[in-house]
Amino acid sequence: MNPESTEDVASGAEQVPDTFSGPRRLPRSPLYLAMRRFRRNGLAMAGLAILAVMVLGSLAGLVWNARAAAHDEPQPYRDQLPGEHPQPPSPGHLFGTDTLGRDMLHRTLIGGCVSLGVGLSAAVVSVFIGTMWGMTAGYIGRGTDTVMMRIVDVLYGLPYMLVVILLLVLIEEQFAWLRVVVLFLAIGSVSWLTMARVVRGQVLALREAEFIQAARAVGSGTVRTILKELLPNLTGTILVCATLTVPLAILQESFLSFLGLGVTPPLASWGTLASDAVEALNPVEAYWWLLVFPCACLGATLLGLNFVGDGLRDAFDPRSR
Amino acid sequence: MVHYILRRLLYFIPTLIVIYTVAFLLMRAAPGSPFIQEKGVPEEVLKARQEKYYVDRPVYQYARFAWDLVTLRGMPSIRYENRNVIRDILAPAFPVSLSLGLAALGLAVVVGTSAGVASAARPRTLIDYAAMTGAMIGISQPSFVIATVLMGLFSFTLRWLPVGGWGSPEQVILPAMALGALPAAYIARLVRTGMLEVLSADYIRTARAKGLAERRVLLDHALRNAWLPVLGYLGPAAAGIFTGSFVIEKIFAIPGVGQHFVDSALHRDHPLILATVLLYAVLLVAFNLAVDVGYAFLDPRIRYE
């Protein structure tokens, strides 16, 4: 063999344009690609912006009222103003005042904390319990699957109102904050069922995939396979389902509020505000601002969540466009 | 198919027993007694009433109420004394709720499907944007707000429709609209997504190449496949309508089953709680079974053995 020719080949190889030249990049993960698709979706980003405004606004209202409480000043969401009420929106009270003379802007912001909190806790519960439940049932299969999914069926078959009401009455009236916690848990406890079903369906499809068999072949245990192999492949499904759980939970809270089972006054949620407004509404005198502002916030939040949910689905499943 | 339906019904029996048991345990575990509002009642009277409803004998109460419900004989309600939960309370109210629910569901299916097809046929036009904006409003507002706005518009301002009550066909329109708004919005979005996906399929191009009218391509060929996801959504939608109806029934003063779902739990009316829970479960399962049978009709690829 001629050593020169070897060198020739080697130098020739160097002359081939190197497609990997320039700063070396790590291979892009599916998650990264999905997030990039998400960022390029205008509607989804708008939804995210709406949600950010709602969350920041509600937190600002919470901080304001907490500060006022700490300084022994009147808390605008709770303490009544002197004079005739309700007043329509004015520069002093941007959202007007309610029938008892409380500032509607502050009540709407505090209501946002409760409503968003209900949504968030439902999402957290459904992500943790629903995902674990669905993955375990789907992956182990057989008898475990049957029993676990029958439990889901049973909980589906119970009217959620009954569950929520019976959980809520466990709490005495005087612990207002405890009631809020129970409300969060009660709504969360019925919101993970859909997640469990969706995740299980997805796991059943993935379970027989080659990469799962490969993981098992090299000796990966059940827990490790579920957490390291299955879970990353379920991210999209879980994110989308969780985003779509939040609006449902917020709406459920508003139904409970309408029935007088939500948070107790002076605390408020968008649901209680809307339901109070509906009750105060009469054909003679329209106190429109009582209804419009909480409902606008509620509507904007639910729209934002739906946009983000759709955007996530498109980002993780480009076929669905 | 018959075999499949029978097997599903057989599976349902243990589920129903468990649902009944869980509801019973929840009901017994909740604090407060059904007789808490009866103040100043002599001890003996209270004891007699407890005995009448077997409140002091939980195991017997569990079995006895189950038997009375399964045989459809019913038992007296605690809150409405001398009224049988099946014969006097649920039987008269159920047809009202059922017709309202079916009207709402029918409205949701018709409106949602038409809106979805219309917007998918002309994507990114005024029709599409108008339909999807409407769907967004339906998704983003609680039904009691929609009901109030509808009532304000059609009953108070335009004076076209009655404010509430039950009995005449006009009185169904507003509550059905309010109740059907959310499912209609979901269905419109599902149909639009499904149609857009299906319309790029090869068999649609074939149908167009054969020279079929666009109307037939859309309604006969595309919609049949695009409608499958809607069928899957109908189960949860029906559950939402059944439980959502009490809000609407309250607003429009409709004597349906909805109020009993809430009131029975609030007043710990043991017989009525168990009766409503079983009614709900049976309805839900019957509906889901109907949906699964519907799948087989709509999609010949689905076979149940």
Image (cartoon, coloured by chain):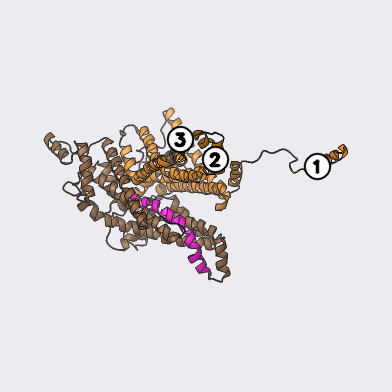
Give the colour chain B carries in the figure.
brown
Mark 1 or mark 3, earlier in chain = 1
* As drawn, B252 above or below A10: below
Q: Residue furthest front?
A: A1
Give the number of the disc on residue A62: 3
Mark 1 on the same chain as mark 3: yes
Q: Residue drawn 28% across and 38% down?
A: B25
Dominant SS in magenta: helix
Of residues A204 and B69, the one nearer the viewer is: A204
Q: Residue drawn 80% across and 44% down?
A: A16
Magenta part of the chain:
B214-243
Residue A122 among magenta residues: no
Of residues B107 and A32, the one nearer the viewer is: A32
| Secondary-structure class at tag 2 | helix
Identify residue for label 1. Answer: A13
- Using a 10 Å C-alpha cutoff, classify the residue at mark 3 as few (fewer than 14 neighbours), some (14 to 19) or many (20 or more): many
Q: Amino acid at mark 2?
A: Gln
Identify residue for label 2. Answer: A213
Q: Amino acid at mark 3?
A: Leu
Q: Residue drawn 39% across and 46% down?
A: A274
